[in-house]
Image (tube, rainbow, N blue to C red):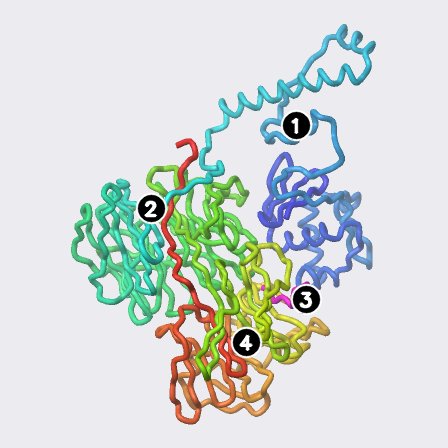
Amino acid sequence: MRWQIAHFIFCDQQQSLVDEKQTLQLEPMAVELLRYFCQHPDVIISKDELITNVWLGRVVSDNTVSKLITKLRKAFADNPRQPQFIATFPKKGYKFIATVTRVDEQQTTRETTPQPTDNILEDSLPRVMQTNPPVVNHSDSEVNHAELLPNSLIEKPKRQLIIMLLMIAFILMTYLIWPVNNEARITTSAQALTTDAGDELFPEFSPDGTRVAYLSNIQGNVYLRIKRIADEKVITIDDHGDIGVGPASWNDDGTKLAYLVGNSNQCQYFIREISGLTLGKPTLIHNCTAGSFGKILFTHDDKRLVYAENNGIATPYALFSIHSETGEQRRVAQPDIYLGGNSQFDLHPTENKLLISSPDQQQWEGFYQLDIERDKLTFLFKLNAYVCCAIWSHDGNHVVMMGEHPAYELIRYRLTGKKEGVIYSGTRVIRAPRRHINGQDYLFSAGNKNIDIALLALDTKQQVMIADSSVNEQFSRFSHHSNQVAYISLATGHEEVWLTDLNRLTRRKLTHFNDDRHYLDLRWSPDDRYLMALTLNEIHLISLEDGTFIRLKIPQNEIRGVSFKRNSVIAYSVKVDERWQVHFYDLKTDSVSKAERRWQYVHFSDKEQNTLWLDQQHQLFVGNMNKELVNNLELANYVMNGRQFNLRKRGLYWYWFDSNRQEILSLLSENDSIQPLVKTRISDFDIAEGQLSYSQANQNNVDIYQTYKATK
């Protein structure tokens, strides 16, 4: 969001405060404070209210608030004795007294009442044009003569002359001073480079442009393919047995490939020589942790590579460098690790610099530059958005990435975080862009793969589709009393909550968000009056009456394992001192308390016998009050899947998704007999009254595309 504050433009997404002289980058808490002031201008706001709504109730002192107010005043060059922006009211609080107006995302100045024509034109020009506008001089005789004419006749030609001169100056400066920048233009065209069955991902052109390497995923089987562009001949690297291969990276002269070989039980990085489509023998350079599905890149030093590795499935990634001949390895300087860690990185086109995309503690994406030679990390900017996979632009002075979820655009940013232009806009959902070798175009994977929701009767095995469309629909959850299923759908182009009536199999849209939020889980309240929805860093409470929502007043952070303890109390887990710990949020008082330190997660159920607890020793217990240890040690391994609960208990039966088998399984406690229920590659499911709701992905092919200019 942007606001015009006096002569400043404040953008909370870019964390910037801009006037005609400079651009200031604000620290995150200053952004939160200024945004709150902009939302509540000309109102006295107490320190307690600021702590509640800006610091979200965290324990901070009055001095902390005062220091941040001082920093904001300094940014505005505001004199506290004669304030123009922030006024202090002793013993009462602060008032934001500057004129504030919300502006459209495409504007650089605020919308006000109509101004004279020449001012409107001046405001529409870039700032470089406003510094020295053309001056129109009139002789005294002209002015005296003009005094005899009506104002309407004199002003019109004068305006036209000024407009014409400004337009001429603008055109001349555009062509003589400004560099031509084709990349910032909107490109509406893309052509397919692959049309194989299945999904083609992670395209990498060889430096000579004759071949493209890419990963091919066909029904869960992963291969590395190399395609020669001239005759479209394709070879497949499949000499590592039935283990997945890819993605890959070329060295600078196109004579070597480095790539990943791995599954849940094995992880290795290899290098092999390649001439045309002829491959040499693979050379193992590193044994990585089993279940670590990272990637590896050659640097511009042919013997030095950078790779990502984690400590196993569902753990965050870190970055390392390795010397291919000596085997020397070291952990490189990198952002602090949160969420999935530092798995997304790109090598500068000409320099040994990495661009690292990394979530921060609040789960928003930050972008960093790593000088590999000096091992020096530099913060570039942060976007408070669900975005991914930034790469360097062709000139190496900008950043290119996908738009917000669901991504239909490729967008170019300056290294300060200022959005500069849309490179491509289409109708397919875009994944991980790469640079084309031609120096101007980009590659990306895109397709219309969709996820549907099915209902399976466990006794008769009859199946009914309850959400079947051409878009993603998932996170289906049974209500407790109303015989409905709630789920998230992209049917409108944005994530919204939908409801299906199981009696009539009719569906309706509950919410009207129309924004770029991204939900990761849903839960019904015990009385079916609310839905709790988990985002990247927030918990929302959605009313079943009208679809409106509120945000729980908790700090933005990685949140896992949400459930209702009762109608007015929500349970969730966040990290405390690097260990997950259960917290409780009281909806009546907006207060937070902690469970005993021993508990990592708790999944409350409407029936006490089905409530599950996992402790810090990874032992599983059941029940609300008299917690009983579960003897089956294997079940504890299935409690969580990312941020969601994966294990369910219904009486004597247990249910979970097995990622290795890609099945939803059940187990009867009395005899430990495991039964497969349904095959699916999507982990999310729910169980109620002998019915299983689950998601299934339709295999609509994802292909690799290349942008191209409309003038070509």
Q: Marks 3 and 4, how far apart in space? A: 19 Å
Seen as rendered, the residue at the extreme top is 141
Residue marked by disc 1:
122
Give, as a three-letter code, the residue at label 3.
Gly
> Does residue 186 appear in the picture of this structure?
yes
Q: Is residue 614 visible?
A: no
Name the residue located 49 percent from the left edge and 74 percent from the top edge.
455
Q: Position of residue 116 (x, y in %)?
A: 74, 27
Q: Which residue is labeled 2 in the image? A: 193
Distance (Cα) linking label 4 and label 1: 57 Å
Closest to the observer, 16 or 707: 707
Residue drawn where x is 57% and y is 81% of the image: 604
- From the viewer's perspective, is the residue at label 4 or at label 1 nearer? 1
Most extreme residue toward the bottom is 670
Marked residue nearer the N-terminal end (1 or 3): 3
- Image: 553 above or below 69: below
Task: Tell me the SS state at disc 2.
Answer: loop
Q: Nearer the observer, disc 4 or disc 2?
A: 2
Q: Residue at x 63, y 38 (%)?
A: 108
Marks 4 and 2, the one that precedes in the sequence: 2
C-alpha separation, residue under disc 4 versus residue under disc 2: 48 Å
Q: What amino acid type is highlighted by mark number 1? A: Glu
Please tell me whether mark 1 sits on a helix, a strand or a loop: helix
- Residue 581's label in the rendered image is 4
Assign a secondary structure to mark 4. Answer: strand
Out of 705 and 65, give the one closest to the viewer.
Answer: 705
Q: CA distance from mark 1 to mark 2?
A: 45 Å
At which x and y percent is residue 25? 59, 46
For the point 41% across and 48% down, the residue is 433
Which stretch appears magenta?
538-552
Q: Amino acid at mark 2?
A: Leu
From the image, tell me which residue sits under label 3. 57
